[in-house]
C-alpha cells in the first residue's frame, strides 16, 4: 500500500473527481478526511471507502471560509498529522459567453474561487506540515492547452488555471526547505465527470477525445491512480510540477 499510515484531506471529496481520488487513497491505505459543503455526498463516498475496508471521515467545510478551513486542518493535524492535502473543489466558472459580454463578477468568479480556496487550504496544511518536515500539497486543474482555439468562451476559467499554476510554483519554492512537495494534476477534460443529461455532453466528449494522441481521455480511475502516485514516496523527486495526464492533448 503506497499510502499506508498517511492522513489525507480532500477538499471537494464528495464530487466525481474528489470521490475517485478518495477511493484510490483509501485503497492504498490512507486515512481519508473528506471535506466539502454537502454532507450527503461526502458520506456516500466515505461509505464506499469503509465498505472496501478503508478509513474515512467527513466534515462540512467551505473551502472559501478561512476560519472553517483552519479549524478543520487543526482537527486533522491533532488526529495524527496531515500528510496530504488535495483541493479539487469546483471553480464556479461561467462559460459560453464572450468576454466582452461578461460582467466583471462572472469573469472573476472562478479566479477568486480558485485562488482563495487553494491559498487557504494550502496554507492551512503547510502550517501543520512544516514542523514535521514533510507533506504533499496538490490541486486539480493545470494551465491547460495553449491552443488559442480552446480558450474560446471560457470566461475566467483559463485565468484561474494559470493563477493556480503560478501559486504552485511559488509554494513549491517556499515550502521545499520544509520537506513539502507541491504538485498540480492536469487533465485534458474528463468525460466521466460531465453530468448525465448535460446539453452537448456527447459533443464535449468527442472534442476531448479527439484532441488526444491516444484516442481516449483520462478516466476518473486514472486520475485516482495518478494522484496516489503523486502523493506517495514513489514521487518524492516530484515538486513544483504539473503532472500531465491529458493523453497527449497538451504537449509539455
Image (cartoon, rainbow, N blue to C red):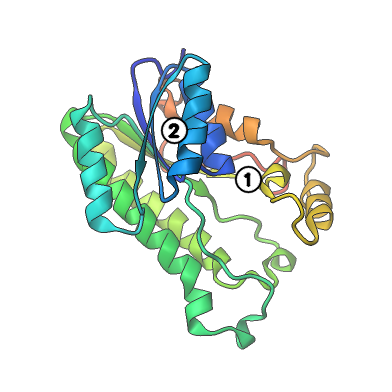
Residue at position x 81%, y 54% from top? 207
Q: Is residue 102 left or right of residue 118?
A: right
Work out whether 98 lies above or below 42. Answer: below
Relative depth, front residue between 191 and 174: 191
Residue at position x 43%, y 23% from top? 232
Please tell me how crowded label 1 is: few (under 14), some (14-19), or many (20+) other residues with Cα within 10 Å.
Answer: many
Q: Position of residue 142 (x, y in %)?
A: 54, 51
> Could you say whether the residue bearing mark 2 is in a helix, strand or loop?
loop
Relative depth, front residue between 84 and 143: 84
Residue under circle 2? 238
Residue at position x 53%, y 36% from top? 19
Q: Position of residue 231 (x, y in %)?
A: 43, 29
Extreme residue in the bottom direction: 101
Residue under circle 1? 187
Disc 1 vs disc 2: Cβ atoms closer than 8 Å? Answer: no
Q: Position of residue 199 (x, y in %)?
A: 78, 61
Q: Is residue 237 left or right of residue 159?
A: left
Q: Is residue 60 visible?
A: yes
Label 1 to label 2, Cα distance in Å? 17 Å
Work out whether 20 lies above or below 101. Answer: above
> Could you say whether the residue bearing mark 1 is in a helix, strand or loop?
loop
Residue 226 sits in quarter: top right
Residue at position x 36%, y 54% from top? 62
Q: Is residue 126 visible?
A: no
The answer to which of marks 1 and 2 sits earlier in the sequence is 1
Work out whether 20 lies above or below 65. Answer: above
Residue 7 sits in quarter: top left
Amino acid at each position: 500500500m503506497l499510502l499506508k499510515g498517511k492522513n489525507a484531506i480532500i477538499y471537494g471529496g464528495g464530487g466525481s473527481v474528489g470521490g475517485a481520488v478518495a477511493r484510490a487513497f483509501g485503497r492504498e491505505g490512507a486515512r481519508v478526511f473528506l471535506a466539502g459543503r454537502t454532507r450527503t455526498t461526502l458520506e456516500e463516498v466515505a461509505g464506499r471507502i469503509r465498505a472496501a475496508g478503508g478509513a474515512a471521515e467527513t466534515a462540512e467545510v467551505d473551502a472559501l471560509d478561512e476560519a472553517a478551513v483552519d479549524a478543520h486542518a487543526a482537527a486533522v493535524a491533532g488526529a495524527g498529522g496531515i500528510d496530504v492535502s488535495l483541493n479539487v473543489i469546483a471553480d464556479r466558472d461561467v462559460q459560453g459567453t464572450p468576454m466582452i459580454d461578461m460582467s466583471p463578477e462572472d469573469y472573476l468568479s472562478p479566479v477568486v474561487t480558485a485562488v482563495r480556496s487553494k491559498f487557504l487550504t494550502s496554507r492551512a496544511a503547510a502550517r501543520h506540515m512544516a514542523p514535521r518536515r514533510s507533506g504533499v500539497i496538490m490541486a486539480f486543474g493545470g494551465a491547460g492547452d495553449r491552443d488559442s482555439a480552446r480558450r474560446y468562451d471560457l470566461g475566467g476559467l483559463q485565468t484561474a488555471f494559470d493563477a493556480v499554476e503560478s501559486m504552485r510554483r511559488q509554494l513549491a519554492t517556499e515550502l521545499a526547505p520544509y520537506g513539502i512537495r507541491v504538485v498540480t494534476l492536469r487533465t485534458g477534460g474528463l468525460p466521466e465527470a460531465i453530468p448525465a443529461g448535460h446539453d452537448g455532453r456527447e459533443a464535449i466528449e468527442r472534442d476531448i477525445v479527439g484532441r488526444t494522441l491516444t484516442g481516449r481521455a483520462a478516466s476518473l480511475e486514472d486520475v485516482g491512480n495518478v494522484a496516489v502516485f503523486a502523493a506517495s514516496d514513489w514521487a518524492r523527486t516530484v515538486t513544483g510540477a504539473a503532472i500531465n495526464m491529458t493523453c497527449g492533448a497538451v504537449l509539455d
